[in-house]
């Protein structure tokens, strides 16, 4: 368990590899450039070595950790990237401050120790190695704010939560029946 859910922390976050793919070919060698994913996927399907070292850009940046769910085998946390308000137009900034944009969640600047005002990008899930983050929070969402972020993530990714909701309703019904005697 990380106990960081809802915390904005600084982390080293690589971007996802995208074409043209640049693959590390060894010390002193130029990277191999592959224009599409097809040859890499074809090789993997044929049983070839599926693991490669990609050269991708990355940033040391603040992220919002969204879950304390943790698996020792991965040693990673699930987070969302942030966007600086300077990248948004004035109208977009006001919309985000009013929580009117479901794809961005406003972080009140008076509660977060960041270089400028930011919003959480709901569509930007990243996995971050625990060794690549500074666990000292720059601010923390409260329980209700984190719940809103979770709801927005579920809506954005169209997650089917029917089974979880049904299970919770059964638990609540059982508790009510128990209380009535």
Image: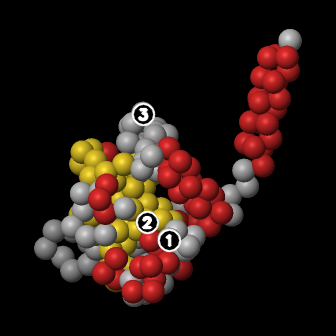
Element type at mark 2: strand
In the rendered image of this protein, does residue 154 appear above or below residue 76?
A: below
Viewer-proximal residue, 62 or 176?
Answer: 176
10 Å neighbourhood of mark 1: few (<14), some, or many (≥20)?
Answer: few
Q: Which of marks 1 and 3 is in front?
A: 1
What residue sits 39% from the left and 56% below the top?
A: 64
Residue corresponding to mark 2: 106
In the rendered image of this protein, does residue 155 appear above or below residue 56?
A: above
What residue sits 45% from the left and 46% below the top?
A: 142
10 Å neighbourhood of mark 2: few (<14), some, or many (≥20)?
Answer: many
Q: Can residue 60 be seen in this view?
A: yes
Classify residue 181 as left or right of residue 137. right
Q: Position of residue 7 (x, y in %)?
A: 36, 48
The C terminus: image quadrant: top right
Element type at mark 1: loop
Viewer-proximal residue, 29 or 15?
Answer: 15
Residue corresponding to mark 3: 1
Give the CA distance from mark 2 to mark 1.
Answer: 8 Å
Q: Where is residue 9 in the image (x, y as percent from the top left)?
A: 30, 52
Give the CA distance from mark 1 to mark 3.
Answer: 33 Å
User: Of the residues under marks 2 and 3, which one precedes in the sequence?
Assistant: 3
Q: Residue 98 carries which label?
A: 1
Q: Position of residue 82 (x, y in %)?
A: 37, 67
């Amino acid at each position: 368990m990380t106990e960081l859910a809802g915390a904005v922390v600084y982390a080293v976050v690589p971007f996802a590899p995208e074409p043209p793919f640049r693959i590390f070919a060894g010390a002193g060698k130029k990277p191999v450039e592959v224009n599409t994913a097809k040859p890499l996927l074809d090789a993997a399907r044929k049983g070839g070595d599926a693991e490669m070292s990609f050269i991708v850009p990355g940033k040391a940046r603040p992220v919002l950790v969204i879950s304390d769910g943790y698996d020792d085998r991965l040693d990673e946390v699930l987070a969302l990237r942030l966007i600086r308000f300077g990248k948004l137009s004035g109208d977009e900034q006001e919309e985000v401050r009013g929580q009117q944009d479901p794809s961005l969640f406003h972080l009140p600047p008076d509660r977060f120790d960041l270089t400028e005002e930011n919003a959480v990008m709901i569509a930007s899930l990243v996995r971050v190695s625990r060794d690549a983050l500074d666990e000292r929070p720059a601010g923390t969402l409260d329980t209700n704010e984190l719940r809103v972020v979770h709801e927005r993530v579920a809506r954005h990714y169209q997650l089917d939560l029917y089974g979880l909701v049904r299970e919770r309703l059964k638990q609540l019904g059982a508790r009510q029946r128990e209380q009535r005697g």
